[in-house]
Amino acid sequence: MSTKNKKKAKIVHETLGLFIKKMRLERGYSQADLAYSLGYTSPQFVSDWERGVSSPPVKKLHDLSQLLKVKPDVLFELLVTLATEQLVTNLAQEYKKVKKAS
């Protein structure tokens, strides 16, 4: 993955993460509160989302949206944007490899 594409993917991850953090803080939850309410055994999951290391799984979006008091579509759209960016990055990488090998 090129540096430009890595930066772009990280920005999208961070956008989702910052949104989750903002909503969590507005609702008065700690990372541990949110994690345990979602069935996780460690607040590290929420920390990873907020830092842009990973994203919440789709199966948790509904519960997460209820806890954060946002429409599920908002989280879903952010996640779709992230997945789209990652797909475009991966396809571009593969294309470059194939083109180079030709």
Image (cartoon, rainbow, N blue to C red):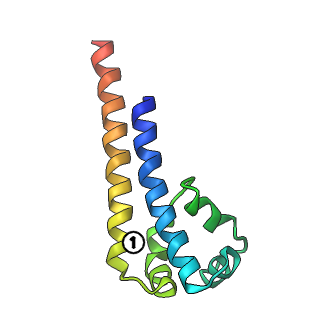
Q: Quadrant of residue 96?
A: top left
Q: Nearer the viewer, residue 75 or 30?
A: 30
Q: Residue at x 34, y 74 (%)?
A: 74
Q: Position of residue 93 (x, y in %)?
A: 36, 30
Figure quadrant of residue 61:
bottom left
Coordinates of residue 41 in the picture (x, y in percent): 72, 74
Position in image of residue 94 (x %, y %): 34, 30
In this rendering, the answer to whether 8 lies above or below 24 is above
Residue 96 placement, left or right of 9: left
Indicate whether 97 appears above or below 93.
Answer: above
Give the number of callouts: 1
Q: Which residue is mark 1?
A: 75
Q: Position of residue 67 (x, y in %)?
A: 52, 86
Q: Residue at x 55, y 85 (%)?
A: 27
Q: Which SS class for mark 1? A: helix
Residue 67 in sight in this render: yes
Q: Residues within 10 Å of mark 1 (few under 14, many from 20)?
A: many
Residue drawn at point x = 51 percent, y = 66 percent: 56
Task: State whether residue 1 appears in this view.
Answer: no
Image quadrant in which the N terminus is located: top left
Which of these two is toward me, 58 or 47? 47
Residue at 57% in and 62% down = 50
**Which quarter shows the C terminus?**
top left
The image quadrant that residue 71 belongs to is bottom left
Residue type at numbered disc 1: Leu
In the rendered structure, the answer to whether residue 89 lies left or right of residue 53 reads: left
